[in-house]
Image (spheres, helix red, strand yellow):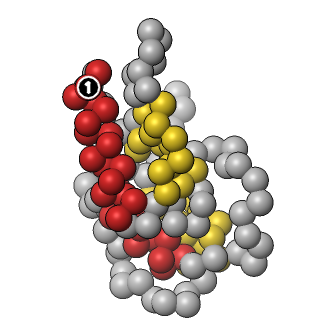
Amino acid sequence: MSTIRQIQVTFDCAEPARVARFWCEVMGYVTPQPFEEGAAWAVCQDPSGAGPRMYFQRVPEGKTAKNRVHLDVRAGTGLVGAERLAVLEAECARLVALGAVHVQTLYADEENESCISMQDIEGNEFCLD
């Protein structure tokens, strides 16, 4: 029988404290210790312990290509149609005010519900789903 393991999502970034603060706001996470400006790393975690820990580490190089893995922030779970789109658009507006970038809204079709492609404050792609 396999062991259940927790995961940590690690972000390479230029400003760990800044990016961690952003993702704490997005996810409703907390930091186990105060952010130190200029530190080489920062952490945020789910206060309930259910979600993955997020670790932000400074790297010297900038982002050069599309992420191979991205986060889907499940803001519209269980909702459909116009109600789902309204919730996603409201969350998009909240995140843009925090410094995120709205990339594209993908509207519902015969197979898929609406979702919104975004970028965090350092250009990492994520989706509001």
The percent position of residue 6, horizontal first and vertical second, equals 47, 48
* Label 1 element class: helix
Taking the image as shown, residue 91 lies to the left or right of residue 12, namely left
Q: Nearer the viewer, residue 34 or 128?
A: 128
Taking the image as shown, residue 83 lies to the left or right of residue 129, namely left
Q: Height in image: 49 above or below 117? A: below
Q: Is residue 5 visible?
A: no
Taking the image as shown, residue 76 lies to the left or right of residue 36, namely left
Q: Nearer the viewer, residue 59 or 65?
A: 65
Q: Residue at x 63, y 70 (%)?
A: 13
Q: Quadrant of residue 75?
A: top left
Which residue has dot 1 on it? 82
Q: Residue at x 35, y 75 (%)?
A: 32
Q: Residue at x 47, y 11 (%)?
A: 111
Q: Residue at x 77, y 73 (%)?
A: 61
The percent position of residue 53, horizontal first and vertical second, equals 44, 59
Q: Is residue 110 visible?
A: yes
**Callout 1 crowding tier (Cα within 10 Å): few <14, some 14–19, many ≥20:** few
Taking the image as shown, residue 46 lies to the left or right of residue 1, namely left
